[in-house]
Image: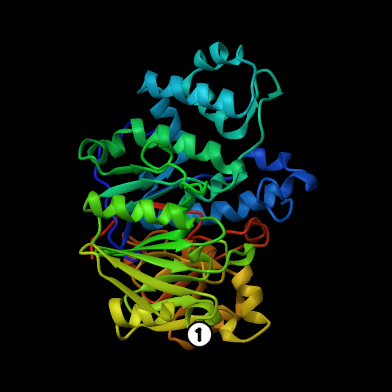
Amino acid sequence: MLKHIINTMIHCNSEIGRLKQLIVHRPDKGIERISPKQAEQLLFDDIVYYPLMLQEYDVYIDTLRLCLGKENVLFIEDLLSTSLSKSSELKTDLINKIITEEELPSSKYAYLMTQPSDKLAEILITGYDKATDEILCDPIPNFMFTRDIGVTVNDGIIITKASKEARWRENLLTRMIIGAHDIFADARAENKVINLNKPDDFPPSKYGERVSIEGGDVMTIHKDYLLCGVSERSSLHGFNLLKDDLHRKALVENVVKITIPSDRSCMHIDTVFTQISHDLIVCYKPMVYDGLGSNVEVYRKNGEVVTYGSIKDFFLQEINPEMQFVFSGKGYSPYQEREQWTDGCNLLALKPGVAISYDRNVMTARAFEKAGYRVMRAEDFCIQYANEPDPLGSIERTILTLPSSELSRARGGSHCMSFPILREAL
């Protein structure tokens, strides 16, 4: 449990400031229940081999714990368990909503309400009750991609809203955590929580378009700039309402709309680019550098709107005129398409110039080496720097690669598997 955590400050004003604390979810056994027929419905492209996926994921966790400290790698299940014990009102509302949405018998309400918090958290996440050997509802395998459930914007936070029904339970559980856990107490007290799941504040449009914004489409790229994709998973209507609320709450000066094709291969903007240092972005060349199928509009708080022909032009004009671009697959077909698909553009920056990637993106790794970066297996890093007082401070310009034969089949990279809540300010 996380009783030792008393820090209630959250803050991220970049994608690259030294990472201090984040939320993750170790793939749970619900993934083992996905059948080939269910895979598409549950947003997986394939069924995965769970034991190997866990081994690969644990290399990710070992790397994070070494770099951040074990106490700063926070697990969803622990946070949820603590939150369920703190607010009976939110707990009651959560269970009622899950019973309704999952079409469970009303008799389950009393049973679930009397379960210990840690057991209840496990049931609500996995959909399975060990004590009765009963499957209550479908798994939520995408919960491992914690980036999508929330986004820290300076010292505020957005509770996102999933596009697909298969992920709605994730949103309910996230609302429980952010609504009750002490970590988010300051954001709640200062009215800096935006909950996109509140229909009174974020209703459908008059044409019936729903609000949907997923965290992979939202990046706090700079203290004055929040990027938001309009994509397969995030709606234009959702963007417009979020933009207005961000400006009303004065959480950020500029909200940047990045429109990309509504296509599974590029479901979020973080599948086509991520920033890993002050002057370097890894990206899918056709869409980001050449501007094919994408466009950018910057909405300033004063009402001005500025348009750019490519994501590259936006970064060069508004963020850093010296920005460089490393291309997935070295920018050549078919490698750029293959490695964009296996998350070659989806990296988590641990600090400026140090990031986590997947080992299977070999051509992208060569592009990093050409740009002057060292590429190192994460397992080797954990062994070599295990006794260093500050392992992360001991390396510069380094890409740490995770084993990824099963992780990559789930269609999300290290950026997707992270929900940063505290970074050093830039």
Is residue 378 at least partly visible in the picture? yes
On screen, residue 39 above or below 327: above
User: x, y (%) of residue 207?
Assistant: 51, 49
Say left or right for 63 vs 9.
Answer: right
Q: Residue furthest front?
A: 206
- The residue drawn where x is 58% and y is 24% is 100
Say left or right for 341 vs 65.
Answer: right
Q: Quadrant of the C terminus?
A: bottom left
User: x, y (%) of residue 300?
Assistant: 26, 66
Say left or right for 214 vs 331.
Answer: left
- How many numbered circles does the render carry? 1
Q: Quadrant of the N terminus?
A: top left
**Within 10 Å of the Cα at label 1, are there few (<14), some (14-19), or many (20+) other Cα atoms?**
some
Label 1: which secondary element: loop
On screen, residue 172 above or below 146: above
Q: Quadrant of residue 332?
A: bottom right
On screen, residue 77 above or below 389: above
- The residue drawn where x is 23% and y is 49% is 249
User: x, y (%) of residue 306?
Assistant: 31, 75
Residue at mark 1: 290
- The residue drawn where x is 54% and y is 62% is 379
- The residue drawn where x is 46% and y is 46% is 206
Nearest the camera: 223 or 19? Answer: 223
Nearest the camera: 326 or 376? Answer: 326
Nearest the camera: 67 or 15? Answer: 15
User: x, y (%) of residue 131?
Assistant: 65, 19
Q: Given the image, on which type of amino acid does mark 1 rest?
A: Asp
Snapshot colouring? rainbow
Is residue 368 at least partly visible in the picture? no
